Every structure is written in C-alpha cells, then in structure tokens.
Image: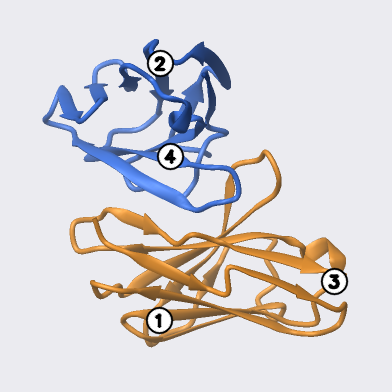
Amino acid sequence: SQQGEEDPQALSIQEGENATMNCSYKTSINNLQWYRQNSGRGLVHLILIRSNEREKHSGRLRVTLDTSKKSSSLLITASRAADTASYFCNAGNMLTFGGGTRLMVKP
Amino acid sequence: GAVVSQHPSWVICKSGTSVKIECRSLDFQATTMFWYRQFPKQSLMLMATSNEGSKATYEQGVEKDKFLINHASLTLSTLTVTSAHPEDSSFYICSARDSVDTQYFGPGTRLTVL
C-alpha cells in the first residue's frame, strides 16, 4: 500500500496566493519527503523533515509534520506560475507514491 | 542536492527492438537504485530495485526477462526493455538513495514504441 496520500488531488490558485497541500500516511516513519514533478520531467527533491521535527522552512516552502496524526502539510507562499506542477510526498522512505497534488498557479 | 542523470531523455523505436536506458548518480555512490514507470497523469509505479553487484528485485507483475536491470557499479544502473512493444511506451524514471536515505530522481526517459 502507498505510504503517503496527497490531498487535494488538484488545486488551482492565482499567482501570489498561498498553496497548501496535505499528506497522510499509515505507519510510523523516520522522515518524510516532498517532491515536485513538472510535466514530463523527473521528481525534484524539495525538502526532508525528520520525525523529531515539527516544522521546516526552505525559501517559500514550509513543511509541517504531525506524527500523532500521521500527517504533513506543504505550504507554498506567494505562489508563482512556475510553481505549477504535481507535488508528491513520500513517507518513511517508502518506494511507493500516492497520486500527488496537481497544482496550477494562474498568472 | 545530489544529481542523478538519465540517458537518453527520449527514445523512439520500432516494435521488437530493445532499448537501453542508463541511470547515473553523478556526485554520490548508490548501492541501491530504483526504476519506476509512469503513465500520463498517473503516479510513479515502482518496477524494480537495482542492487549493485547482485540481481535486481522486481515488483509483482513486472517481467524480469523483459525489463533487464544491471547495476554494474556504484554509480550506474541500466534498464533494458527487450523486444519492446507499443504498450511499453511510457515514462521511465530512475532514482538513487544516498547515505542519509534521501531519494534523488533522474529526469526521466520518454520511450515511444511504434
């Protein structure tokens, strides 16, 4: 079974708005990673958050992790058209992926 | 972050031919690499785990004789699609795991079988 299911499946926002996507998982993990995939390209590693961390920032990205709820969120602030992509989470270094969140940022 | 390359980035071939795809970790050694395939608008599906110096581990439903994997060194794994058919047309992505368990992905190879 997949370790990491993203929600929502699709998200459409205007440039400048914030985008929030969520990830739920089932078993205990040591870390959780978020990836971005542009259409027809490979996955780009965005950020890794460890199980003893609650929040982590990287540029316009903010990731939270709630191990009690087995969930994580990825917030992209001040979104840009170039942020349009699919976003995947991967919990606990599992080799399976959920369907991702398809983010569209309209200029 | 670490870099993983794939070659070629795209390939078009005739039905019945074999195609080899290379995956390289450019700035780190990877004892384990992974091969995925992805159909349009779908998620990645793990095909096999490539282990340096030993046989690959295939996921259920993946034909090992059709998708040959060779992990000859700590920085190179190859996937050969043998006797390719149109249904093998897909986007193939490899990844490599570094020493702190982060997976880095290659840019993918678009295979089109005519």
> What colour do you see for chain A?
blue
Q: Are marks 3 and 2 in contact (CB under 8 Å)?
A: no
Element type at mark 3 = loop
Q: Whole-Å distance between the Cαs marked 3 and 4? A: 30 Å
Element type at mark 4 = strand
Judging depth in this view, the residue of A76 and A32 nearest the camera is A76
Sequence-wise first label, 3 or 1: 1
- Residue A56 shown left or right of residue B29 in the figure: left
Element type at mark 1 = strand
Sequence-wise first label, 4 or 2: 2
Both labels 2 and 1 in a single chain: no
Q: Residues within 10 Å of mark 4 (few under 14, many from 20)?
A: many
Q: Amino acid at mark 2?
A: Ala
Judging depth in this view, the residue of A8 and B51 nearest the camera is A8
Which quadrant holds residue B92? bottom right
- Can I make out residue B75 in this image? yes
Q: Which residue is mark 4?
A: A36
Q: Are marks 3 and 4 in contact (CB under 8 Å)?
A: no
Q: Residues within 10 Å of mark 3 (few under 14, many from 20)?
A: some
Q: Position of residue B36 (x, y in %)?
A: 56, 59
Q: Which residue is mark 1?
A: B76
> What colour do you see for chain B?
orange
Q: Which residue is mark 3?
A: B85
Element type at mark 2 = strand
Q: Whole-Å distance between the Cαs marked 3 and 1? A: 25 Å
- Label 3 resides on the chain identified as B
Labelled disc at residue A19: 2
